[in-house]
Image (tube, rainbow, N blue to C red):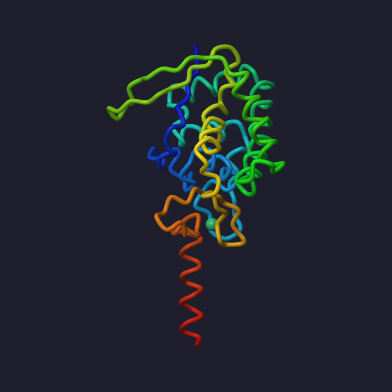
Amino acid sequence: MPTAMRSPSTSAPAATSASSASFVFVGERLWLDFVNSDDSTHSRGDSRTDALDSFERFVGWLSAARILDEERATAMMRRAQQQPTGSSAALHEARRLRNVLRALAERGDAPQERATQTAIAEINRILGRSAGTRRVEPRSDGGFVRNFVTTGDVFAGLMIPAIESAADGLVSGELQRVRKCADPRCARVFFDGSRNGKRRWCDMKTCGNRAKAARHRKKISG
Ligand SMILES: [Zn+2]
């Protein structure tokens, strides 16, 4: 069965199903959410959940990001059981690509930057080897989704949506608006889509709230 993936034309929506409710999407762009997948839940304090610590969790994250629908996620897990070497290679490559995209997100807004050049080479390598077709399919909620249906290696296509999202970021000149969370303990990155370009926190529920509480404490202690 071919495996289809969501087109990354929009940012990943918040997770809705119970199984994926723990993942957080605050990057405003799919590729930035993918970079943030090393700290993928609403964690407080030092506990982190890396969405790439197993292939199963990776598939869970891809589902939460709506890159895989339920049927395809199940099929992907079945394939992983049949081809453990292929799935662990795919997981390994996903981690490596995440490092490359993080470097791009953190300091890639100059074309001559090494991080940018490395990212472009990796993006082109992934896009170049992807074989498949694009389709529009109905979604269970009544809407429609544009899918990329891979032919050949099923695992090879898993990274296409995040990689295409990063390519879109480069093409549209959005890198100048990619920021790292202002909390030094937080490594999350996000696209600042605010009108004044002054978004500082990855998430008001965690980092933004902590900063607000710290300001408040400072005020009352004089
Ligand atoms: Zn943060």
Q: Position of residue 63 (x, y in %)?
A: 47, 32
Q: Position of residue 177 (x, y in %)?
A: 51, 50
Q: Is residue 170 left or right of residue 85?
A: left
Examine the rendered structure and indicate whether residue 2 appears above or below residue 65: above
Q: Quadrant of ligand 1?
A: bottom right
Of residues 70 and 184, the one nearer the viewer is 184
* Residue at 56%, 14% in the rendered image: 131
* Residue at 48%, 41% in the rendered image: 29
Q: Position of residue 110 (x, y in %)?
A: 64, 45
Examine the rendered structure and indicate whether residue 48 appears above or below residue 168: below
Examine the rendered structure and indicate whether residue 120 appears above or below residue 203: above
Q: Is residue 85 left or right of residue 144?
A: right
Q: Quadrant of residue 124?
A: top right
| Labels in figure, total | 0
Q: Position of residue 69 (x, y in %)?
A: 43, 26
Outermost residue toward the bottom in this view = 222
Outermost residue toward the left in this view = 142
Outermost residue toward the right in this view = 114
* Residue at 49%, 38% in the rendered image: 172
Of residues 63 and 127, the one nearer the viewer is 127
Examine the rendered structure and indicate whether residue 51 appears above or below residue 152: below
Of residues 179 and 23, the one nearer the viewer is 179
* Residue at 43%, 50% in the rendered image: 193
